[in-house]
Image (tube, helix red, strand yellow):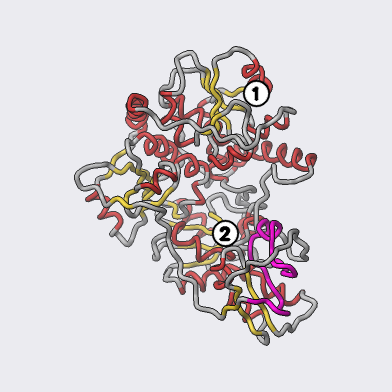
Amino acid sequence: MISVEELVAALSDQDELALLDVREQGTYSNNHILWAANLPRSTAELRISKLVPRLSTRIILVDEDLMVAADVKVTLEQMGYSNVNMLEGGIAAWSNHGQELYSGVNVPSKLFGELVESRYSTPHVSAHELQNWIDSDKKLVVLDSRTNREFRTMNIPTSRSCPGGELVYRIFDLVEDDTTIVVNCAGRTRSIMGAQSLINAGVSNEIFALENGTMGWELAGLTLEHGASESVKAPTEKGQSQASEAAKRVRNKSNIEFVTEDILKQWVNDHAHTTYLLDVRSSEEYSEAHLKGFRSTPGGQLVQATDEYMATLGAKVVLADDDYTRATMSASWLKQMGWDVFIYEHGALDRELVAGLEEIELEAPEVPNTLSVGNSLIIDLSTSAEHRRGHIPGAIWGVRGRLSELAQRHSDPNPKSIILTAKNQIISALAYEEAQKAWPDAEVRVLKEWDGEEEQGLDTDEVIDDLWILPYDPVDAEVAREAMIGYLVWEVDLVGQYERDSLANYELRSAV
């Protein structure tokens, strides 16, 4: 057990530490420690090696009553992690000691975005003013800094998709000197970071962040488009050269260092310290060819959701791209967030190039399988959203970490046969032993595949807390509106929490 005082001390020193909150994402989003990455019990084995790649890293697990943390501790130790601890008293103890708790997800990045706007006075434009610009003859380009998938779901009229990490890389072919640039996202963070990235890179145009993004657009009573696909093209040779020069200026001002292949090998082979190897180009470029050992983390997503990619505080981070532009812009922000970040230097000692997605594979345990369901109790361990969209008729939804509770609540406490299923089949296999403990007198099997009809909906007495619900997800328009307002207020209010939190300490420069 680790006390709150010991955790405070650990977060304050320079030693490596991975603080992991093992509650389901929905519960985690209600209240958690700022620096705690979410590692839900449901998918712990699938995500841990990316979040915490070094097996001897000091890990501290957090939950509410330590039951789930104890279970995850056993699992991680079986996987080879050798320094796994638990926070004594859980999340309540942290709060009772007067420490700050945060709501939401990706809070380290969301908070940082608000601090960036405050520190740099990033210019912004309201939804109605932007609509007036669109309706006028103003020379204008609107760039959506979210992912291409998000852009296809909904977009500001006339906008084009250009994920945040690509903005400086692609901007110089796109605009003339008298073109006004507006950057938007769904809310605030990627709009602010995208606009400020262009300003920091020395782009001389008028540049604005769309205030409150697509949410602000909807709240203003304006109409979004759906199904758009227009993306900003990759730069020409001239445009790339201009981007490289802009990035060089940022790199010099930010004092970002390069790391060579021979030094990097020493870091990677140092089993006492962690080094993350991240490729910040687009996923399409990564799939075509990338440096072996580097993981795909498009720059805009990395900066706006650091806790989804890196959980080991105090680790080194090495970023790679093809001309240093995207690596520089991402590194300039990560450095101000406190990461020890470097850029991989191309040269004669470059490592091997490989194609495809370099994923960390986890072999599913061998468990009894079946191809039919019969009269068994079918438990769907997919996410609640996946279950709603479609599941085997008669299947009940469950959360992997709460199977024993589900067994106690179910009307038939002693079913003869239990069948586990999930959209990701490996989750069913991983839950096999837990299901055996929950139903010791039943035959437990895992459904290998299902090609029959499915039904929709989610009718369950299970606590639906596995996912954080996006503000624009509710079907009811008024509920969605209230959720969007609440979300935007929450983002702005993060600055107040930062000022109260002695453990939150970003290193923003006063000017770039």
Which quadrant holds residue 152?
Answer: top right
Helix, strand, or loop for circle 1?
loop
Would residue 32 appear left or right of 235 to someone viewing this image?
right
Mark before the other along the chain sequence, 1 or 2: 2
Q: Name the residue that disc number 2 marks.
A: 21
Would residue 12 appear left or right of 430 to someone viewing this image?
left
Amino acid, disc 2: Asp
The boundaries of the magenta stretch are: 372-397
Which dot marks residue 126? 1
Residue neighbourhood size for the residue with mark 1, other residues' Cα within 10 Å, grouped as few (<14), some (14–19), many (≥20): some
Q: Residue at x 74, y 77 (%)?
A: 408
Q: Is residue 378 magenta?
A: yes
What x and y, as percent, mark residue 259?
27, 44
Which dot marks residue 48? none
**Can you say whether 460 is above or below 482 in the image?**
below
Give how far apart the Cα atoms at labels 1 and 2 are.
Answer: 37 Å
Q: Is residue 418 magenta?
A: no
> Can the viewer see residue 118?
no
Helix, strand, or loop for circle 2?
strand
Along the line of sight, the residue nearer the viewer: 178 or 332 = 178
Which quadrant holds residue 340?
Answer: top left
Q: Please state, as top left, top right, bottom left or bottom right, where the C terminus lies in the image.
A: top left
What x and y, as percent, mark residue 496?
62, 38
What is the count of numbered marks? 2
What x and y, as percent, mark residue 129?
66, 19
Amino acid, disc 1: Ser
Along the line of sight, the residue nearer the viewer: 274 or 484 = 484
